[in-house]
Image (spheres, coloured by chain):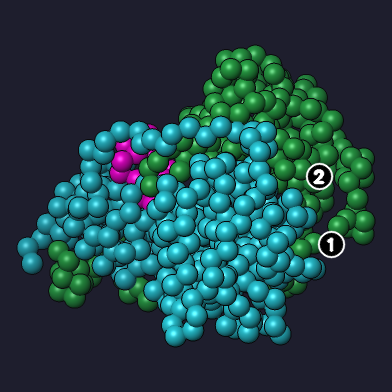
Chain colours: A cyan, B green
Amino acid sequence: MSILAVMEQRGGAWNRMSFETLAAAQQLARELDTTASAAVLGQSIGGLAGELASKHLERVYAVEHELLQDYAPDAYTIALRQLVEQAKPSIVLFPHTYQVRDFLPKLATSLGRVAVSDAVSHRVDHGQVVLVRQLFQGKVNVDMRFAGDAPHFASLQAGAYRADQLAGSGPRAAPAVEVVTPRLSTSDIRTRPLELFRESQRAVELGAAEIIVSVGRGIKEAGNLPLIEKLAEALGAEVGASRPICDAGWLPMERQVGSSGQTVAPKMYMAIGISGAIQHLVGMKGSRTVVAINKDPDAPIFEAADYGIVGDLFQVVPELIEALHKPK
Amino acid sequence: MKIVVAIKQVPARDSQLRIASSGKRVEEADFSYEINEPDAYALEAGLQFKETHGGEVVALCAGPARVRQTILEALAKGADRAIHIEEEDPGALDPLATARLLAAALRSEAPDLVLTGLQSDDLGCGQTGPILAELLGLPHATIVMQVEKHDGGIRVKRELEDGWFQHVEMPLPALLTIQSGISKLRYATLMGIRKAKTKEVRRVTAAGLGVAGPEGAPAASVTMERLYLPQRTKHAQLFEGSPREAAAQLVEKLRFEARVI
């Protein structure tokens, strides 16, 4: 039995979530009394692999090929399948990034397995790993258990494990870096990835705001937004939004907070009519004080909040504006 | 150009969830159902692609009798016909088993383009699309915002994290998972609703598709052991009373305890 963490890099820069996955692999290895290894894929990744060699790991695999320079699901699936067949890990862990979402189900299928996607925690029960994932937008949990033969696959939710608990290699010998050259040819890769781009320069830097008032589906229609703007004005705040609001075009994309939008950490973050899907929470969880106003007492946003009001925003927000206008 | 859109029916977003005593499922008795939102956008993308380039849109849905409503809605919005895979308990299937069913129905259709939502609002595995692509041997892209014809194939715009995007080109046939919110969803017209009832809905079963039942299926590599309501680690101070009282208490705390205003 052994654990393998597959790290993610783009253009030589780590996706930081990878280190959460690496910490999880170490933790699992400790609990299962086995070893953890790590793999990184790309071209000219010697430096990145060398960085991993300073961690407490059994082995570091540098999977190098010129066809792994830019990400493509076909190339990653083939290369990782070969790595898994060679290294024979029992459990392979990934960060639940957009890239992993793109290829992991395909990889697992090619080996006749089902991956557990977006796990939030685990426990070890009778020497077996039980992974917890969320259903119904975080309202229900489910325990998942691997069955049958290894290898097993899982991706881990952003923030579920802590990168700062990563163990260095310490006094023991640093893990050896093993260079793996997958058998890949251009005809294996059917999609052609082009350059990455951003839509436009952001006119609003939510990241610099001290107070953000964010609005979600609860606002019901664009015509109700002035209510939120009035509250923001009373607080001297910038207006942010959850994804559905920007998707609907009610507010510009640059005001979107969350994994596909901006990551913010203001002094105060007020979430109004936002249920708190994980994609939103990862974008604001660094805020110092979080306030939630939502009619659903079970909305996950209340778990991230310091202060909350369970109620109808159309009744609460006008009262809040009035209270803010009263002298101290 | 034949486009098949795989759609799923899910419990309405504001459903009250209770766990059945078996711990294996949620109590469905008092649910109302709707189309999975990302799948509604996949259907919209399919209909728009057909309007620009011609062809046919086929809706594909697995589930019990109740999913007929969702199929009818897809037909009313403009899908030309539908395939209903009759499956009493789709919730008991893992993503691979579900995809095997869908793949079996898709093989006989031999579509040029397969579309589906990037994930479901209920189970949220986000795996059906890429698994289908692997089972069908199709190139794929996920979290797609835009689809255009290009050089005999397609060129799509993928969403990445932190506001980044990427164009990806691929030949047809191909499979795409569509991101929510990529365009405005259309409403069914009265005419559309009337016409939907006359459109073809082909009903098939797992056995009819040649997909083995639970006994003959390959062993699952993951099992759903137990569903439960999460322990709320709430430390939020909640303010009660009338909206006016609650708002006043909140402002008081923000001023004098958190000192953020």
Circle 2 packing at 10 Å, graded few (<14), some (14-19), many (20+), is many
A249 falls in the magenta region: yes
Across and down, in percent, residue A239 comes to: 25, 47
Instruction: Identify the amino acid type marked 1.
Output: Ala
Measured along the vertical axis of the image, is residue B45 above or below residue A286? above
- At x 72%, y 60%, the residue is A85
A315 falls in the magenta region: no
User: Please, which residue is most extreme toward the left here?
Assistant: A327
Q: Nearer the viewer, residue A160 or A167?
A: A167
Across and down, in percent, residue B89 comes to: 79, 54
Instruction: Identify the amino acid type marked 2.
Output: Leu
Q: Secondary structure at mark 1?
A: loop
Which sits earlier in the primary sequence, circle 2 or circle 1?
2
Q: Callout 2: residue from which chain?
A: B
Q: Is residue B205 left or right of residue B162?
A: right
Residue at mark 1:
B219
For the C terminus of chain A, give its image quadrant: bottom left
For the N terminus of chain A, give its image quadrant: bottom right
Q: Which residues are magenta?
A: A243-259
Task: Same chain for labels 2 and 1? Say yes or no.
Answer: yes
Residue at mark 2:
B101
Q: Is residue A169 left or right of residue A86?
A: left
Labels 2, 1: front one: 1
Across and down, in percent, residue B114 comes to: 68, 32
- At x 65%, y 50%, the residue is A182
- At x 53%, y 66%, the residue is A177
